[in-house]
Structure formats: structure tokens, C-alpha cells
Amino acid sequence: MSSDFNRMITLLRKEKGITQKKAAEDLGVSQALLSHYEKGIRECGLDFVVRVADYYGVSCDYLLGRSADRSGLTLKVEDIPSPDSSRDGTYHGSVLPVFNKKLISNSLNILYDKLNRNPDRALVSEISAYLMLAVYKMFRLLYSAGPRNAPGLFGVKRSVYTGYSDAAMHVAEANAQAIVNGEDGEKGALRDPAAFAMSTETLSRDYPLYASSLFNLIKTSEDRISKGTRKDD
């Protein structure tokens, strides 16, 4: 059984606000057995996977980690809406860069929409700084690969820009965390933390065009994290 299964059934139950006892009763198993499934101590049969999928209204592929989308959709580049695609609907360039660009762009649409629900200029500034620094680092990395590219485009020395930008990203992340914790916002705690309440179900409902991109970005990122620094590509 996929290692994602126990995590997903726990997530779905908590998103629904259902107790483990209630879920176990509805699914026809003991609470102790469901607890073992959620902790990954025991593996279930495929019939139970199907029951869970029907119970939570998701696909078996989603439960098993084969798809990042609740419906089981496997995204292709042409399936992802792009806010800057050409007018004729044709995507130009090779598939991988376009695919990843759209995952990131569509996920950012959700991120900034959520920020707009509870506008805190400091929080927006820190999150934006973090993202811009990440883009800056990767763009400069590519720029440096061109032997004839003039180094004068950048003001920070080549020998220190990676360390300095990493430090600036850590500061932006720490500041954003402090704001979210209510320690350093413009007016103390965020005005309406409930604006950031979300689940896979509400994200899919509120962002039908973009949620699949976000879910795939999360899965891709966590796959990368789990692999550490190995280069399997």
C-alpha cells in the first residue's frame, strides 16, 4: 500500500471534522483498526480503499498518491489553464518548462488571492520578497551560464550573491512567520485568520481552474524533498 494512504485518510477525516470513532463506524471497521491504518501500522485491502474513496468523495488514485487531484486527474500540459497563453490557445516551447511554469503561476494565483482575503502589507511584502529572491537566484544562475553575458547586470558580487540571497530569503521567511503568528503584524495579530482556513475540498471548489496545479506542485515538491539532493532526472 502506498505510504501516502495513511496520510491522506487522516487528512480527509480531519478536513471533514469527523472523529476517528465516527469514521470507523461509517466505514464498518473498529476504531482501533482505523487508527492502525491512519498510522501506517497495518495495511488494508483494496475493498477498504474503495469504501474510503466513496466515503470522502475522492478517487482511489488520490488516496494512493497516484494523483495530486481529488478527482484522480493526471495533469497534462494542455489541461492546465494559463493566464498568459497566446491568444490562439497554442502553447509555445517544450513541454516541461511550460508545464512547470503553469503549475507555479496557477499556484501563485491561489497564494495571492488568499493574501488578498486578509490584506497585511507587511505579510504581502515578506512573502513577495521571498519569492522574488528565489526567482532572482535562479535567473542569475542561468545568466552566469552564458560566458558572454555581461556581469554588470547585477550589483551584488558573484562570489557572495548566493549566500546573501539565501540569508535575505531566511529573513523574509522569518518575518512572514512572525506576522502569521501575530508577533510582528502592522496591527498585531492578523485581522481575520479564518480567511486562511482551507482544505483540499474548499480549494478545489473555490479555485476550479488552479487547484490541480497547486496540488501537483505540492506533490512534486514533497517528492523532491523526500529524495533529498539526489539527481534522478
Image (cartoon, rainbow, N blue to C red):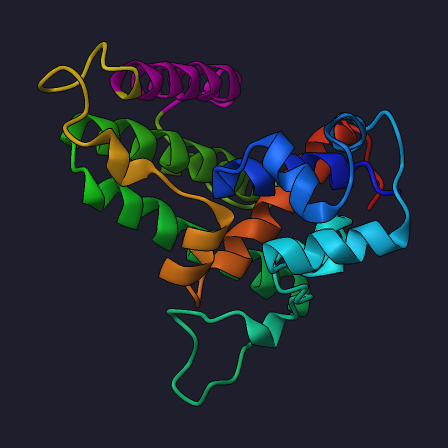
Q: Please check the rendered image and state whether residue 160 is part of the magenta-colored stretch, yes or no.
A: yes
Quarter of the image with the N terminus is top right
Indicate left or right for 220 with 204 as reference. Answer: right
- Quadrant for residue 23, please give it: top right
Residue 55: which quarter of the image? bottom right
Tell me residue 30's x, y (percent).
Answer: 77, 33
Q: Is residue 171 above or below residue 231?
A: above
What residue sits 23% from the left and 15% below the top?
182
**Residue 93 visible:** no
Magenta region = 156-179
Residue in the foreground of this view, choosing between 135 and 148: 135
- Residue lying at 36% horizontally and 54% vertically, measured from the top left: 109
Count of numbered marks:
0
Above or below residue 47? Residue 152 is: above
What residue do we see at 71% from left, 47% from top? 27
**Residue located at (71% from left, 36% from top):** 224
Main secondary structure of the magenta stretch:
helix
Residue 74 position, x and y percent, is 69, 66
**Where is 163 relative to 70, above or below?**
above
